[in-house]
Amino acid sequence: MPILALIVVGAAAGFIATRLMRLNTDIPTTIAIGVIGALISGLVLRFLIVLTGWAAGFVGAVLGAMVLIWLWRMYGPRR
C-alpha cells in the first residue's frame, strides 16, 4: 500500500511541479519526476530530523521567516 500511495502522491506532485515550471512532459515522465522528487525530499527531511532533532524545526522557522520577508518586499507597501 505505501508504494501505491507514493505513486499517487508522486503523480500529483509531478503534475503540479511540471505545470509550475512550465515543462511539457508525458504522463510516465511526470509520474517519475514526482516519485523521485518525493523520495529525495523524504530522505532529506528524515535525515535532517534524525541528525538535528529540534534544530530542524529551527531551520524550518528561519526558512519560513525568509519567505515572509520576501513576500513583504514583493507585495508590501512601497516607500
Image: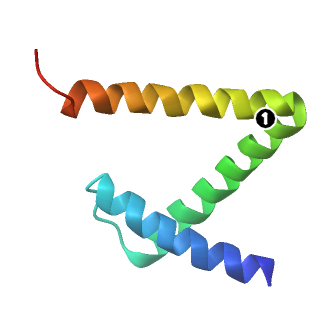
Q: Position of residue 52 (x, y in %)?
A: 85, 28
Q: If the image is split into quadrants, where does the N terminus sit?
A: bottom right
Q: Is residue 31 above or below residue 45?
A: below
Q: Amino acid at mark 1?
A: Leu
In the image, residue 13 above or below residue 50: below
Q: Which one is in front, 31 or 63?
A: 63
**Residue identifier under label 1:** 48
Residue 67, picture quadrant: top left
Q: Quadrant of the C terminus?
A: top left
Q: Which residue lies most toward the left here? A: 79
The one of 28 and 58 positioned closer to us in this rendering: 58
Q: Is residue 43 above or below residue 76?
A: below
22 and 26: which one is in front? 22
The spot of residue 59 in percent (x, y) is 66, 27
Q: Is residue 57 left or right of residue 29?
A: right
Q: Give the side of residue 48 with respect to residue 61, left or right.
A: right
Write the residue at 69% across / 79% down.
5
- Give the x, y percent position of residue 47: 82, 39
